[in-house]
């Protein structure tokens, strides 16, 4: 993981700490325990308090602890042991939280997956991490059964979301009316999942039997906790390795960043998917560590969130900019107050100043922008939760986090203050490397624990960071990372496409959309047919929103496609746009 012949760098000073909100420590005490220990502390302190709410059904911290012990014992009966990988393929639901901590309790490793991934996407990741058990939404089980039989995957646990709902809601979903049938079909499978080639255990069966004994070996902070897949600049996503210490540190840093947060007295909204690094840290670790009530949503739906806000209003709402805009608009139309939301943190894409203004007018609370990557657990920088924040920037480094700005061509050479360069990050939340990818790890982690972000930034004299560009050509759409190479490979599998280049184009209101420039193998390309083809290969958010047919792709002298030039060309669409 080290870089040879690197020049030693002096310990950086942290001028930005003077801009922290009142009460934020420059060097908070980090927990020297595992994520399991943090959760169990909340179980002991807040046993009778609600931990999870799902469609108005509440689970207390005491009940959550009991379910985790039961699920851990069930997984042990399936043969899961310390160090094994266990795949979670679920939307947000109570079973997701229980499964996450049950896997960790055994000393095993969680691997999160988007349940909307296609067969091809799932197969690549399962071939990479060799999970022995998958805990999956019942609508995904048949796709997992279709994975090659020579994989390490031995058995599957099937999760029915409807079983976690209140009895009244379950009864309504059984009504013989079209609306109920449609809602139930979106949540669970009608027929029983097939049992071949891998045996399938229901979630209910998993929890039967004696709970895991307290004497069972516990994980320690340095143990690997999660493999979180993140898109790289080329090829397929890579698995970032995050330890208990990494994730516990980031939860503690986030807790310290919000000095008005009340342990045991907050209501977090889990609108971000927990299979994403952002949702994982804010919902699965931070919320649980502070004893918050976590209201879970299987997907973001404005009316669903506003219905919940009318009865269980949030006090802390992590999200992405489009969600804040839609909630304000929806609340105004329905006459619902959002005034209880004291804190909101936005990430994954640029936060427009107008979104901040509208949200803070509607709530009376604060909305700040943060910055992070999967490799930093994920939050590394944030705007202060107070008057020193600077909209338009991504803020300053979190406590105990250092940054450098370097020459992208030679990361041993620091840029002068105010100059643009690549952002390097060092801190307790920085990952351990990429699973099964030692070369990628050596390229990303330099001597001294510095992580290369691939982002070009500028830093002002106070330490506030503005992101200017990305070396990595990732596309960020709806808060998710899309690898252009992955989409290009899918496009080129269609017989009408000879070549393809995929870029992210800025959309109004922030974020990007996936746009493809394609060279036809024949005379003309049917854009809609091509999108339909790619939709069978990739998750919906990766499918190009616009396909432009061009005669040739701009290339460098060595033949590499110049995506930046492609992007420039698409700023003014040519006449041959489809």
Image: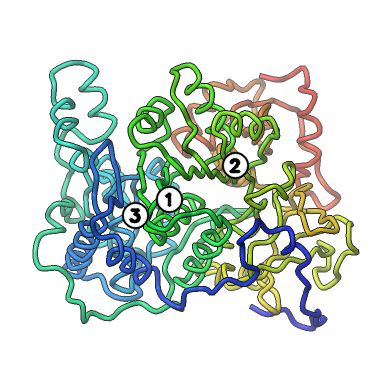
Q: Residue 275 bears which disc, if any?
A: 1
Q: Is residue 448 left or right of residue 320?
A: right
Residue 270, image x, y percentages: 41, 44
Q: Are circles 1 and 3 on residues that touch, CB within 8 Å?
A: yes
Whole-angstrom CA distance, mark 3 to mark 2, is 33 Å
Residue 117 percent across, percent down from the top left:
42, 43
- Name the image quarter holding residue 42: bottom left
Q: Viewer-nearest of labels 3 and 2?
A: 2
Residue at 81% from the left image edge and 34% from the top image edge: 568
Q: Which residue is mark 2?
A: 366
SS for tag 3?
A: strand
| Image point (57%, 52%), residue name | 231
Q: Is residue 252 above or below residue 392?
A: below
Q: Gap between marks 2 and 1, in whole Å?
A: 26 Å
Q: Which badge, 1 or 3, comes first in the chain's sequence?
A: 3
Q: Position of residue 175 (x, y in %)?
A: 13, 21
- Front residue of 62/452: it is 62
Q: Along the horizontal axis of the image, is 162 left or right of 545? A: left
Task: Measure the C-alpha gap from mark 1 to mark 3.
Answer: 8 Å
């Amino acid at each position: 993981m080290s870089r040879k012949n690197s020049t030693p760098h002096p310990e950086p000073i942290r001028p930005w700490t003077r801009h922290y909100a009142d009460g934020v420590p420059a060097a908070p005490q980090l927990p020297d325990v595992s994520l399991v220990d943090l959760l169990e502390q909340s179980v002991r302190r807040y046993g009778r308090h609600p931990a999870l709410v799902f469609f108005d059904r509440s689970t207390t911290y005491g009940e959550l602890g009991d379910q985790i012990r039961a699920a851990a014992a069930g997984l042990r009966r399936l043969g899961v042991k310390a160090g094994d990988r266990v795949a979670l393929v679920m939307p947000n639901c109570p079973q997701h939280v229980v499964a996450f901590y049950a896997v960790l309790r055994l000393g095993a490793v969680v691997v999160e997956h988007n349940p909307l991934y296609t067969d091809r996407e799932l197969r690549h990741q399962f071939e990479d991490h060799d999970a022995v058990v998958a805990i999956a939404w019942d609508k995904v089980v048949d796709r997992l059964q279709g994975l090659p039989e020579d994989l390490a995957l031995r058995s599957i646990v099937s999760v029915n979301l409807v079983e976690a709902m209140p009895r009244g809601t379950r009864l309504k979903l059984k009504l013989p009316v079209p609306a109920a049938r449609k809602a139930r079909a979106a949540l669970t499978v009608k027929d029983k999942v097939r049992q071949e080639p891998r045996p399938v255990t229901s979630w209910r069966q998993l929890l039967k039997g004696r709970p895991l004994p307290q004497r069972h070996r516990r994980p320690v902070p340095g143990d690997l906790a999660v493999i979180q897949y993140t898109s790289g600049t080329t090829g397929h996503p890579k698995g970032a390795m995050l330890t208990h210490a990494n994730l516990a540190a980031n939860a503690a840093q986030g807790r310290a960043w919000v000095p008005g947060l009340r342990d045991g007295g907050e209501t977090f909204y889990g609108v971000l998917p927990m299979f994403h690094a952002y949702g994982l840290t804010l919902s699965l670790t931070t919320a649980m560590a502070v004893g918050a009530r976590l209201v879970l949503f299987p997907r973001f739906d404005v009316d669903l969130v506003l219905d919940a806000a009318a009865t269980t209003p949030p006090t802390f709402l992590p999200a992405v900019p489009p969600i804040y805009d839609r909630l304000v608009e929806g609340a105004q139309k329905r006459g619902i107050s959002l005034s209880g939301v004291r804190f909101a943190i936005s990430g994954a894409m640029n936060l427009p100043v107008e979104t901040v203004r509208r949200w803070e007018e509607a709530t009376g609370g604060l909305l700040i922008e943060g910055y992070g990557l999967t490799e930093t657990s994920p939050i590394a920088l944030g705007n202060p939760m107070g008057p020193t924040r600077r909209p338009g920037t991504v803020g300053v480094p979190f406590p105990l986090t250092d940054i450098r700005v370097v020459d992208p061509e030679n990361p041993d050479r620091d840029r002068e203050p105010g100059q643009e360069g690549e952002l390097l990050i060092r801190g307790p939340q920085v990952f351990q490397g990429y699973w099964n990818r030692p070369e990628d790890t050596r390229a990303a982690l330099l001597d001294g624990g510095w992580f290369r972000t691939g982002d070009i930034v500028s830093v002002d004299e106070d330490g506030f960071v503005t992101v200017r560009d990305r070396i990595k050509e990732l596309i960020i759409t709806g808060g998710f990372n899309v690898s252009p190479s992955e989409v290009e490979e899918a496009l080129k599998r269609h017989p009408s496409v000879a070549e393809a280049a995929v870029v992210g184009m800025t959309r109004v209101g922030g974020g990007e959309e996936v746009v493809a420039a394609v060279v036809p193998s024949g005379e003309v390309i049917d854009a809609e047919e091509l999108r339909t083809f790619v939709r069978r290969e990739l998750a919906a958010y990766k499918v190009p929103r616009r396909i432009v047919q061009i005669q040739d792709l701009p290339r460098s002298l060595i033949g590499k496609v110049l995506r930046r030039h492609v992007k420039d060309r698409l700023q003014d669409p040519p006449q041959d746009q489809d």
